[in-house]
Image (tube, grey):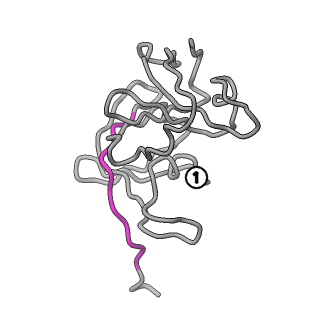
Amino acid sequence: MEDQRISVETRAVRITLRTGVQLEGELFLQMHGAHQFGPQRVGEVLNGAEPFIPLRHEGKIDLLNLHQVIAVETEASDEFDELLRLGKEYRVEVHMTAGPALQLATFVSLPDEHNRIKDFLNQGRKFLLFLQDDRVVYLAGKEIVRVID
C-alpha cells in the first residue's frame, strides 16, 4: 500500500489570508477521483470537506487553514469552464472584510429561475467563483461584507 500514490498536478495560485498576507505558490490537485471527471479544480479543493490544504510555497509545504483564507486567484485559462458563461452575467463591486473593493464578474445559472446575484451569493458554498480580467477569483463567502450590483 505504501507504494501507491495519488496522481496529482499543481496549479499556480495567489492566496490572501485574513491577516492581509498574500502567498504565491502551488496547490495540489488530484488528476482522478471516484466522483470526478477530469482533473480537480481549485474550487473543488476550496469547497471540499478538508479544513487544511497544502500549498507549495518558497520550497516548503504550508498547510493553510481555509477558515483563514479570504481569496484565491488563479489563471482563468486553467480553471474557468466556458460552459459557466451560459448564465446571466453580473458585474459587481465586492467589499471584503480586508483590502480594497474588487470589480468582478460572475455568471448565474441556477435552477428554477433563481438567477439573481442574491441567489448566487446564498448558495451555501464556502468559496464563490468570480472573474477578474484573465483570472478566476474565489472569495470566501463569510468574508464578503457587501456586493453592489
Q: Is residue 61 above or below residue 135?
A: below
At x 62% / y 36%, what residue is drawn? 109
Residue 58 position, x and y percent, is 23, 47
Residue 72 in the magenta stretch? The answer is no
Q: Is residue 123 above or below residue 104?
A: below
At x 40% / y 77%, what residue is drawn? 5
Residue 7 in the magenta stretch? The answer is yes
Q: Which residue is mark 1?
A: 48
Residue 86 position, x and y percent, is 53, 38
Disc 1 crowd, CA 10 A, few/some/many (<14, 14-19, 20+): some
Where is the C terminus found, in terms of image quarters? top right
Residue 93 position, x and y percent, is 49, 14
- Viewer-proximal residue, 118 or 13? 118
- Viewer-proximal residue, 134 or 31? 134
Which residue reaches farthest left? 59
Q: Is residue 101 above or below residue 109?
A: above
Q: Main secondary structure of the magenta part?
A: strand
- Viewer-proximal residue, 105 or 89? 89
Q: Is residue 146 above or below residue 46?
A: above
Report the magenta residues as a range: 5-15
Which residue reaches farthest right? 112
Q: Amino acid at mark 1?
A: Gly
Is 86 on the left or on the right of 16, as rendered?
Answer: right
Residue 27 position, x and y percent, is 37, 52
At x 45% / y 32%, what residue is drawn? 71
